[in-house]
Every structure is written in C-alpha cells, then in structure tokens.
Amino acid sequence: MTHKSYTAVINYLENHKIYVDRDEFELQLEGHPDFPSLLAFSDALHFFNIENYSYRIDNDEKDILPEDFLALVEGELAAVKNKNNQLIMNGSPTNDFFSKWENIILVIEKEEELAVTKSRLNYSYINWGILIILFLFLLGYNSSNIILQSTFALTSLIGFVFAYEAYKKTHGKGTFIPVGVCKSNYLNTDCDLVFNSKKWKIFNKIDLSEISLLFFTSQIVCFILSSLARNIEFFFTVYQYALFTFIPMACLSLYYQVFVVKKYCPVCMIIITCVCIQLLTANLIPFDAKKINPGSVFLFLIGIFGSLAVLLNLRTKNGIAQKNENSIKRNLKFRRNYLFFKNNLSIQKKLMDTDFSGAFVFGNEHADQSLTFITNPFCKHCKEFYPVFLKLVKMYSDELRINIFFDIDLNRGDEDNKTVHVNLTNIYLNSRNKAEFLEALSNWYEVQAYSENKNGWYTKYSKYFGSSEAALNLLRRHENWVTANSIHFTPDIFLNDTEYPIQYERADLEYFIPEFLSEN
C-alpha cells in the first residue's frame, strides 16, 4: 500500500466529515512496524480514536455491503460507494470491482451522542401557550368583531395542529391522533392510505400534508405580522377572497377519498371544516379598503415566503433523517447477517487451552456447544453486557454449556480485589442453586462503585462465605486458563474455541446464537 491508499483513506474520512492531522496520520503510518499493511491503517485510525473494523466478505455476500467503505483492491485501499447497485470507486463508476477486490473491507463507525434518558420539560406546551397568549394579545389591537376574529384565529391554530400531525404521519412519525380514529373498519377511515396513496398521478408529486401545513403556517404568520402593523383589515381582505381558492382543493380531496381511495381521513375532514369556517368568518368581517397599503402587502409577502422557507428547511431535515434511518437499517442488516458473521468468526483467535473444567459452569454441562464468558467483577463494560449474558443463559441453558472465568491476577497484592473474587467464588461453590451466583454477580455490578451499598450485598450473601482455600484453588485455575489463552481484556467471549469478533457489539451476540446452534 502506497500513497494511493493514503489518499483513499483521507477522502473516505472527509466524506464522513472526520478530519485528522495529515502529517501526524502519515507519521503514525510510516512508524508502524507493519506499514504499509491494512493493519497499519487500522491502528493509525485507532490512534485518532476513530473506531474501525475490517471484514472479509465473499462475492456471494456482496448484497450486504454497506453504502460506503474502504476495500482492498489489487493490494491498495480504495474508497467505494454503493449507490443503487452501482459501485463508485475512488470517485469513478466501476464495473469490474468484484473481479479485482480481495474480499476485504474496512469501515469506520462514528460515535453517536448518547440519548439523554433523564426526563425533561416538554417545551412544546410552553411554546403553544405563548403562541395562544400572543394571539389573544394581538386580537386586542382591534376590539371590533372580536368574536369573529377569535373564531378565525382558533380555527387557524386547530388547522395548523392537525396539518402538522398529518405531516408527521405522512413522514412516518408518531402523532397524538388515536390509531382507532385514523384507521377503523367500522368508521371506514384510513389516514395513512389517503395521505400516502398514489392512485392519482396528480398526487404523485403533491404532498397534501405539506400544502396544508404551509397554508396554516403562512396564515398564522401573516395574521401576527398584520396585527403588529395594526392593519388586520388587510389580512381579512386577502383571505376574504383567497379562501375561495381552497374550495376546488377541498372538493378534489373529498372526491379522492369517496370515489378513488374509498376511505375517509378524519384529519382531512377537520382541516376542510376549519377552512370552511374561516371562509364564512372572513366574509362576515367588514373591512376598510383604504387601509390597504404597500407596507401591508410587503409584510404579507414576507409571511408567505418566510413560511415557505421554513417548510423547505423542514423537508430537507426530514430527508436527511430518513436517509440516516435507512442507512442504520442497512448497516443493521449488514452486521446481523449470520453468513457474514460466521465468515468473520472463522478467522478469529482460537483457544490454546480448551479445558473448561475449572470454570463456573451453567446450562447443559454435557452440551456439544459452549459459550464462554471471561469477566471481572470491577469491569464496567462487563456490567453493560451482563444483562444480555443472563438472557442467553435463560434462553439456551438446555442447548449450551455456559462457562464463566474470572480474569484475576492473584499476585497483585490488592486484598479488597481478591476478597471480592473469593466471596463470589464461595457463593458459586457453596450455594445449592448455582443461579444464586449469577444473581450475586449481577447485584455486585450494581453496587461496585457505591461503597455505602456494599454492606447490604455482604450481609445478603455472607451465609455462603467460608474458607477461602477452596475458592483460591479454583481462582488459580481461572488465572492459569486466562494466561494460557493470552486473554488481556474483559469482557471477552468465546463460541466453542473461537473468540467472538471484536468488530461486533457484544449485545449483538443474541442475534447469532440460534443459527450457531442450528448448524452445529
């Protein structure tokens, strides 16, 4: 691998909006003992805290390739994009990629921000409250016809709310509209079918929910601007006539529901009703044509085009979100394909010592297949994986021999560390129901960082604490086994005698166990 590979990696990173110090990156590469191998590039990326994984993929598995990746092609790394079954390599379309590549790819994984799980104040209610109060305040600028103006304003808000809910529903988002209302055989309603059906060519490029949202958004904005300019008469002058243009659209929508789709949309009906009320209200409000001026027209146009700009921005964001969602789904399919997983499992590290007799054993001791978990009571990553491990123990105890080894160094001189290991081992040795050990380890993970809670743990399980000699003897076997197999981190997992690929999230293990068992 030469400068060509270096350029491909840099371009690939920049495509993901990841920027590194090129001089430092090049220095790390050239200083690597295996340069210019794939391992050198992978380690250099890890130096910059860029998670990356390499995979081996056979040609018959090419349909699970991600959207973009680095591939080893004729000894060089190439940046490849997979768009609509057309491969683009280093910026140019290629038709002979699969005859040249070496069935190895390198992909990066960007860290996403953790979702905040703490409850937060729902600011949408505050926003709506401010908006409603603002409406009531603005109505005070012209106290005449207050009931008609309030009716118009209220139907604007109701129309906007339902138009926005329709927009969310059209784009696959959750809404407050009950499912039983929007889709009911008894009521013959189906909002999704009405909004997403393309039975008419006229609706192939028209999104009714977007039109409705733009209509009510611009109406509210223009109403506020006209009120602030103290020329609300101009606003009603415009809508006194403009609302008539909605009648053909309403008739078209009703015809479409009744005769084409043959289903009704309650959301559409509410929106149509709101506009009909507004049409009636606007024509009952008297106005003074003398108050129409260029300034009012300018403000009105600002409201219209400002609302359009906001909607276009919302559409762009939704498009990006949908693309990211599709990419995530594709990557999940890519990562959870068992044939691909099996292919990568076959090239992983093998155990040198396959004697599991010294392990904490659960499940079926005589099963042909085994799952081995190497852990440490003080390991935070083990704590994260442990619920998944317990789930596997519960589900596959009849089909798997499940082994647990502690990664312990008895020569460390840390008595507290040794005491915890000894106590847990005694729980395993002295309890009649070995599941108590699994429970005790789970409870320990919960209190390991909180000294004030540890006394409760010791009190609960102290009945199993006894002589440390038998526990130490078993722990020495754990230590020897871990050392013999050159295990240096926890949690580590082995399926039979093969290490679980580090490229995969440990939680993904549960997706592969069923097929692993079925083929062995």
Image: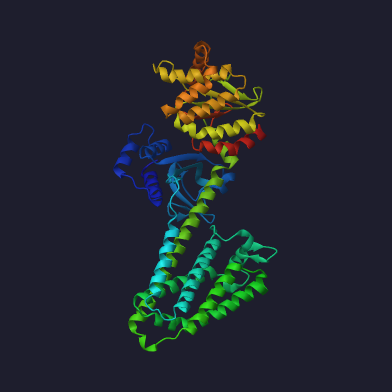
Residue at image coords 55%, 80%: 247
Residue 20 as seen in the image, left or right of residue 475: left
292 w.r.t. 271: above or below: below
**Picture quarter with the C terminus:** top right
Toward which corner of the image does residue 35 lie, by quadrant?
top left
Image location of residue 64, percent across then percent down: 56, 47
Relative to 466, residue 198 above or below: below
Whether residue 481 sits left or right of residue 60 in the image: it is left
Answer above or below: position of 5 versus 392. below
The answer to whether residue 350 is visible is no
Looking at this view, is 229 or 173 the one in front? 229
The residue sitting at the right extreme is 186
In the rendered image, residue 513, in percent from the top left (x then y), is placed at 61, 35
What residue sits 42% from the left and 36% below the top? 39
Picture layout, residue 205 above or below residue 54: below
- Colour mode? rainbow
Q: Position of residue 264 (x, y in %)?
A: 64, 69
Left or right: where does residue 72 sit relative to residue 23?
A: right
Residue 160 visible to an observer of this rendering: yes
Q: How many marks?
A: 0
On the image, which quarter does residue 110 sit in? top left
In the rendered image, the residue lying farthest to the bottom is: 290
Measured from the top left, where is residue 227 in percent x and y?
37, 76
Identity of the residue drawn at 38% across and 71% down: 137
Camera-side residue of 324 and 467: 467
Extreme-left residue of the structure: 23
Quarter of the rendering occupied by the N terminus: top left
